[in-house]
Image (tube, rainbow, N blue to C red):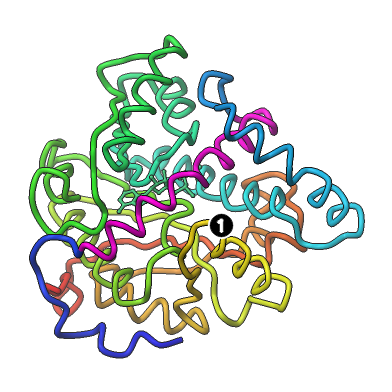
Amino acid sequence: MSTSGTSSGTSSGTSSGATTSSSARISPTAHYTGYTWLAHGLSHPALATPTGRFLYRALTPANRALAAAGKANLDGFLLARHHLIDALLRQAIERGEVSQVIEVACGLSPRGYRFAREHGPALTYVEADLPAMAARKRELLAQTGASSPHHRVVEIDATADDGARSIDAVAAGLDPGRGTAIITEGLLNYFDPVSVARMWRRFGRALARFPHGLYLADLHLGEDARPVERLFAGLLGVFVRGRIHFHFDDEAAAVRELAIAGFGRAALRRPEAHQDLTGPVDAASARAVRIIEGRVQLDAGTAPRSS
Ligand SMILES: C[S@@+](CC[C@H](N)C(=O)[O-])C[C@H]1O[C@@H](n2cnc3c(N)ncnc32)[C@H](O)[C@@H]1O
């Protein structure tokens, strides 16, 4: 897939207007996924919205028919990605590598709610999204009654190079002595390859200040996209009024770009290959998505390059 031109020459400065306006269109999908997590017992009812319920119920017949026919379906792939990100984060926490998390584009995801409850003060969990979604999430989280000083929601713009809403500013508010993870789920495929490469470099630089830096995210590869995935991506593109991208043809191309961003150790995990960690996933659906497990390695030559 074309990422040519992203290895050098990306400019710094604040985010582009084009990217910011496409960001605003993505928000409705957060309502859909938010309801999906609740429908599968992963969330608190306060984190689901009427919009999410409406959208989820509208797609339920199609999802059920595909699942019954043994075909890839939306629920199957969302759950596969969500469970594997959970499992890899849990593993890093248990190994003592990570005790701070920034979940970028958190939407209505219950991960922060679940992990903050599970780990208490041992884990600092920062949820982050564009201003309107961040305000909504803060309000809904308050309704769960689970507020804690170690779990907060902040504003972020993943396309910002600097300023109060940049990843760098959010990371600067954390303890530089503790291992830290950045998570994005359901974000990358809405952005073009150059924007993703820039985003990864911002993340790489933000994580370089910590003793351990871990990046977890879902990614769709060109080589995994069969006609049904491309059709679904086209439909989703109509819904969000923007294109859905398959940035890289294969794992090697994605790993190369992650290395340039400072993630000297990176792998793309297949959810269907890690059911020992996640429990059962729907293999037909899981094959459509990979989970990036990227680690910042500050050896010579792998330090994050400036964009
Ligand atoms: C598909 S939703 C995914 C939400 C959540 N991660 C989940 O899996 O349920 C995409 C989220 O990305 C957020 N978003 C879009 N553009 C963004 C940007 N530039 N910076 C941060 N968040 C952004 C939207 O507000 C929305 O909450």
**Residue furthest toward the top?**
145
Q: Position of residue 47 (x, y in %)?
A: 51, 25
Q: Position of residue 192 (x, y in %)?
A: 37, 73
Q: How many marks?
A: 1
Q: Residue at x 66, y 34 (%)?
A: 54
On screen, residue 220 above or below 257: above
Quarter of the image holding residue 230?
bottom right
> Is residue 28 in the magenta section?
yes
Q: Position of residue 268 (x, y in %)?
A: 50, 68
Quarter of the image holding residue 294?
bottom left
Q: Residue at x 42, y 77 (%)?
A: 254
Magenta region, main secondary structure: helix
The one nearer the camera, 196 or 176, is 196
Q: Amino acid at mark 1?
A: Phe
Residue 179 placement, left or right of 52: left
Q: Position of residue 270 (x, y in %)?
A: 60, 64
**Residue furthest toward the right?**
69
Q: Residue at x 40, y 88 (%)?
A: 2
Residue 267 placement, left or right of 129: right
Structural crowding at the residue carrying mark 1, measured as other residues with C-alpha within 10 Å and reported as few (<14), some (14–19) or many (≥20): some
- Disc 1 element: helix
Give the quarter of the figure containing the C terminus.
bottom left
On screen, residue 16 above or below 137: below
Look at mark 1 in the image and give the residue it sits on.
239
On screen, residue 1 above or below 28: below
On screen, residue 36 above or below 201: above
Magenta region: which residues?
Answer: 17-42
